[in-house]
Image: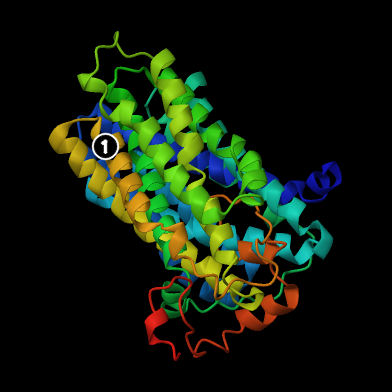
Amino acid sequence: MLRIVTAFRALYFAAVMLLTGSGLLSTYLALRLGAEKVDGLWIGAMMAAYYLGLVLGGKIGHRLIARVGHIRAYVACGGLVTAAVLGIGLLPWLGFWLLLRVAIGLGMMCQYMVIESWLNEQAEARQRGAVFAGYMVASYLGLVLGQLVLVVHPGLGPELPMLIALCFALSLIPVAITHKVHPAPLRPAPLEPRFFIQRVPQSLTTVLVSGLVVGSFYGLAPLYAVRQGLSTEEIGLFMGGCIFAGLLVQWPLGWLSDRIDRAVLIRNAAILLLVVALPLALLPLLPVPPISLAWLLPMGFVVCLVQFTLYPLAVAFSNDHVEGERRVSLTAMLLVTFGVGACIGPLAAGALMKLFGANMLYVFVCACSLILILRVRPEKVSGLHRVDEAPVKHVATPDSLASSPLSAALDPRVDEAAVEEQMKGNDSSAPVPETETEAEEESRPA
């Protein structure tokens, strides 16, 4: 593993800097707007705008890279992101901030695509799992470091946007000066929504709910912590600890996922999420001492241990029912579905927090858990389209859209030849087979 980290250190460093800036920016915006008494709906809209930009960037990024090349596209988008961050620091207009957040998401998605295509080009087939794991660790490490900056520098003055812009600027250096050969030209993978909605409906439901929960967490958890009376330093520790839980749970989750039915795991995770989020949802009604970091951090940590399992489990579950040549398209579909949920979640939770109070964030998490409990039914999985190698080996996966559809090419479950064929997008008109569930069983001939 040390050899892989050394070989890809420049790209991993770029990913760490990108995610440090992104994680710090999300928390800074929530704290800044909370300090100015802006209601939670605007704060949720800021996070929704970011995820909207990420989804749009998945389409626009391919065209930009094809037009000007990987390095120029990466540097141009890095310049856009850096300028947008400085614009947020200079111009305190909320409507303009929303446009800048969309631009930041769009630019960052293009940067993710460049980094991941380079990793894929340089990684040998036998290294893909380790390279993918290193990229995931770099992503989570950046997110955690972004929160810990607040512990060292708790002020919300103009220094923080400058520091965020500095992180984005530093991420340009290793890619701009690389001597590596350019990766092959990119081709967008077809989404094939009708195929996947019918083939893996329970997986897509889980991904959508995961987007609702995770998007709300990143956008509104800092505001929740403010409303509970935590200082800026304590909020940095709270957010850093919660995000670290997402990294910590990935490896034991992989061990369980390869040994226990994944539909059962998803439903049990939803039940557990409901149980552990309920105390935070009911906190104003409970006879507890004054709220402090000592109370909130362990409870938030446990909630995040569970909520960050949903997306990786859904990815593994869907891979069990989709052939290797379609897995790049599957990843694109999962990321778009996650992005839709992450756009809706902060807006809905922000509106609830505005009307009924800060604890509505975790009431919303409980409601999302109930949706999964009702919708994911292990007994409905017919196994008609289960692939021969199922259960496909679980691979730890970032679930905050800190990746692009190209991350599928790094996945050791995906065959390289199948990736080449699928990225050409020649089979988007393929017929849609029956579903992974028994919902359409009656339509099949006897």
Indicate the quadrant containing the C terminus: top left, top right, bottom left or bottom right.
Answer: bottom left
Q: Is residue 64 above or below residue 176?
A: below
Q: Position of residue 60 (x, y in %)?
A: 47, 71
Q: Could one spot residue 170 in this view of the protein?
A: no
In the picture, measured across the screen, residue 224 lies left or right of residue 249, that is left
Residue corresponding to mark 1: 363
446 is higher (above) or lower (below) than 28 = below
Give the residue displayed 69% in from the left and 78% down from the top. Answer: 418
Quadrant position of residue 248: top right
Q: Position of residue 181 (x, y in %)?
A: 78, 67
Q: Nearer the viewer, residue 432 or 442?
A: 442
Q: Residue at x 55, y 60 (%)?
A: 317
Task: Give 143 or 258, whichever is nearer the viewer.
Answer: 258
Q: Residues within 10 Å of mark 1 (few under 14, many from 20)?
A: many
Quarter of the rendering occupied by the N terminus: top right
Residue lying at 82% horizontally and 50% vertically, measured from the top left: 7
Task: Please indicate whether residue 440 sits to the left or right of residue 119 in the image.
Answer: left
Quadrant hosting residue 216 = top left
Q: How is the image coloured?
A: rainbow
* Most distant residue in the front direction: 446
Residue type, label 1: Val
Kind of element beneath mark 1: helix
- Is residue 394 visible from the viewing direction of this image? yes
- 77 or 119, nearer to the observer: 119
What number of labels is visible?
1
**392 or 418: which is nearer to us?**
392
Q: Residue at x 59, y 65 (%)?
A: 319
**Outermost residue to the left:** 355
Q: Position of residue 386 (x, y in %)?
A: 59, 71
